[in-house]
């Protein structure tokens, strides 16, 4: 965490899809690299759940950042 921001770096193995939960008030607060996460290659926004923006993520390396991350814990799973 950087101040009130939340950063998560993930590596998704080849031939795998993961669901990544990033603490945020909306999907618009989440970036992947320097771009909005919802429009990043290999990333699809699937909805909000329990204070997190949820993304379906294809194999590859990603860096998610949320401006309003707060003290929640991100969860990943396939």
Image (cartoon, grey):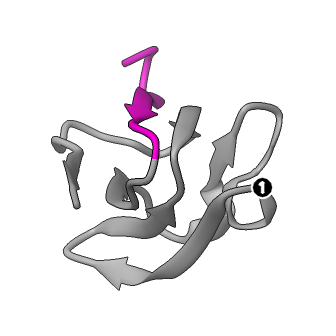
Around disc 1, counting alpha carbons within 10 Å, would you say few (fewer than 14), some (14 to 19), or many (20 or more)? few
Give the image quarter of residue 41.
bottom right
Would you say 39 lies left or right of 23 here? right
Q: Residue at x 39, y 42 (%)?
A: 69
Image quarter (top left, top right, bottom left or bottom right) of the C terminus: bottom left
Q: Residue at x 28, y 68 (%)?
A: 51
Determine the residue located farthest toward the top in the rendered image.
Answer: 2
Would you say 64 lies left or right of 20 here? right
Image quarter (top left, top right, bottom left or bottom right) of the N terminus: top left
Q: In the rendered structure, which segment of residues is drawn in magenta?
A: 1-14
Q: Position of residue 32 (x, y in %)?
A: 67, 41
Determine the residue located farthest toward the front in the rendered image.
Answer: 15
Q: Which residue is nearer to you in this view: 14 or 4? A: 14
| Residue 12 position (above or below residue 47) | above
Q: Is residue 2 magenta?
A: yes
Give the image quarter of residue 53.
bottom left
Q: Position of residue 13 (x, y in %)?
A: 39, 37
Mark 1 secondary-structure assignment: loop
| Residue 52 position (above or below residue 77) | below
Q: Position of residue 18 (x, y in %)?
A: 34, 58
Q: Which residue is nearer to you in this view: 45 or 61? A: 61
| Residue 36 position (above or below residue 2) | below
Q: Residue at x 43, y 58 (%)?
A: 24
Q: Which residue is mark 1?
A: 41
Number of residue marks: 1
Q: Which residue is nearer to you in this view: 70 or 44? A: 44
Q: Is residue 53 magenta?
A: no
Would you say 2 lies left or right of 72 here? right
| Residue 69 position (above or below residue 4) | below
């Amino acid at each position: 965490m950087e101040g009130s921001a939340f950063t998560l770096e993930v590596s998704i193995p080849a031939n795998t899809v993961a669901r990544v939960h990033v603490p945020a008030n909306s999907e618009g607060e989440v970036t992947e690299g320097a771009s909005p996460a919802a429009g990043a290659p290999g990333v699809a926004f699937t909805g909000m759940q329990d204070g997190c923006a949820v993304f379906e993520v294809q194999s590859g390396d990603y860096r998610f950042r949320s401006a309003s991350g707060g003290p929640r814990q991100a969860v990943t799973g396939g």
